[in-house]
Image (tube, helix red, strand yellow):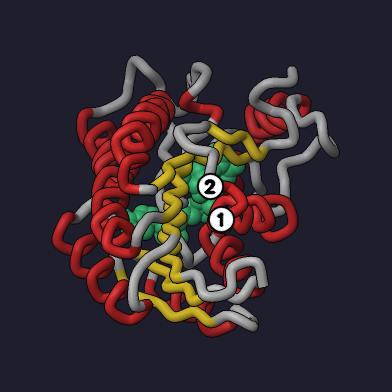
Amino acid sequence: MQLKGKRIIVTGSARGMGAATLRSYVKEGAHVIGMDIQDDLGREVAEQASGPGKASYLHIDIADPSSVFSAFDEACEILGGLDAMAHPAAIQRSSDAGEVTVEDWDLMFAVNVRGTMLTNQAAHKHMKQSGGGSILNFGSISGQRPEPSAAAYSASKGAVHSWTRTAAGTWGADNIRVNAILPAMVTPMYQEAIDRGFDEEKASRYQVQMAGIAMGGEYGDPDQHLGPVMVFFASDASWFITGQMIPVDGGQTNVK
Ligand SMILES: NC(=O)c1ccc[n+]([C@@H]2O[C@H](COP(=O)([O-])OP(=O)(O)OC[C@H]3O[C@@H](n4cnc5c(N)ncnc54)[C@H](O)[C@@H]3O)[C@@H](O)[C@H]2O)c1
């Protein structure tokens, strides 16, 4: 019951790390509203999460300002305020630096960067009224190092890191902390990225990525390895941590 009484929004809750985060919060006693663009899956994840906390679901398109602000207003009406917001929702596309199209670039920045700004602004508005809170963005090792197979995605995650530092500096005065998780987890997004290559490329990309994981040599399990970290960052125990990029990646970012 580390999150007893906490009122939390989780974006991207229909699958992957968003779904695991929602389950972890409900297990620790929080009242959670999951949001996603995939409504059937999103509803199912919220219905199946087992207590002592509880969860429900609302539709959101994080790239669309009116969708974000109306979903957050409705959620905070139901929750009676807002204490934490986890924001894993994002998209990834492969794109070589020389060939990335304007359409792909704009889509990636609309969802990953504008979506981060909008959800963070909406969360800030409600957390300020609640006396403070914790915002958890999702960056990536792709925002720290070159990512030749996903140039636009990599640039968008670099922008999420910069935004996270700036928002943390600005909103500390409102008792709101802002951090970003840099994960390495087995999820549908990860699987789709591996599957996009041809067989030989798939095998070598897999080997390179796993070679960087000092702990266990494999990407993590979102429920087992990410969930407890997300609980810590939503709890008051993490109050003095803000503006940080937190790798939860078995060592991939810094060890090798
Ligand atoms: N999987 C990894 O190892 C890894 C590594 C580095 C960073 N990340 C980042 O971690 C986060 C979670 O990734 P994941 O692997 O769980 O991804 P995922 O693709 O499995 O889940 C992402 C969710 O976001 C939702 N979404 C996409 N566009 C949306 C929109 N416009 N509005 C609302 N919801 C939308 C999707 O429907 C999906 O449910 C992402 O920000 C990702 O970039 C993942």
Q: Is residue 27 above or below residue 123?
A: below
Q: Position of residue 162 (x, y in %)?
A: 36, 27
Q: Is residue 213 above or below residue 128?
A: above
Q: Crowdedness of circle 2 by 10 Å Cα count: few (<14), some, many (20+)?
A: some
The image quarter containing residue 107 is top left
Label 2 close to label 1 by CB (< 8 Å)? yes
Q: Which residue is mark 1?
A: 236
Residue at the outermost right position: 216
Q: Nearer the viewer, residue 70 or 102?
A: 70
Q: Amino acid at mark 1?
A: Asp
| SS state under label 1 | helix
Q: Nearer the viewer, residue 131 or 4?
A: 131
In the rendering, which numbered label is found on residue 200?
A: none
- On whether ligand 1 comes within 8 Å of the CB at mark 1, the answer is no
Q: Quadrant of the N terminus?
A: bottom right
Q: Nearer the viewer, residue 193 or 41?
A: 41
| SS state under label 2 | loop
Q: Crowdedness of circle 1 by 10 Å Cα count: few (<14), some, many (20+)?
A: some
The image quarter containing residue 154 is top left
What's the residue at 60%, 76% (across, down)?
29
Q: Position of residue 43 (x, y in %)?
A: 45, 79
State whether residue 15 appears in this view. yes
In the rendering, which numbered label is found on residue 239?
A: 2
Measured Cα–Cα span from mark 2 to mark 1: 5 Å
Q: Position of residue 251 (x, y in %)?
A: 73, 29
Q: Left or right: 228 with respect to 102?
A: right
- On whether ligand 1 comes within 8 Å of the CB at mark 2, the answer is no
What's the residue at 45%, 33% (across, down)?
243
State whether residue 95 appears in this view. no
Q: Is residue 19 above or below residue 80?
A: above
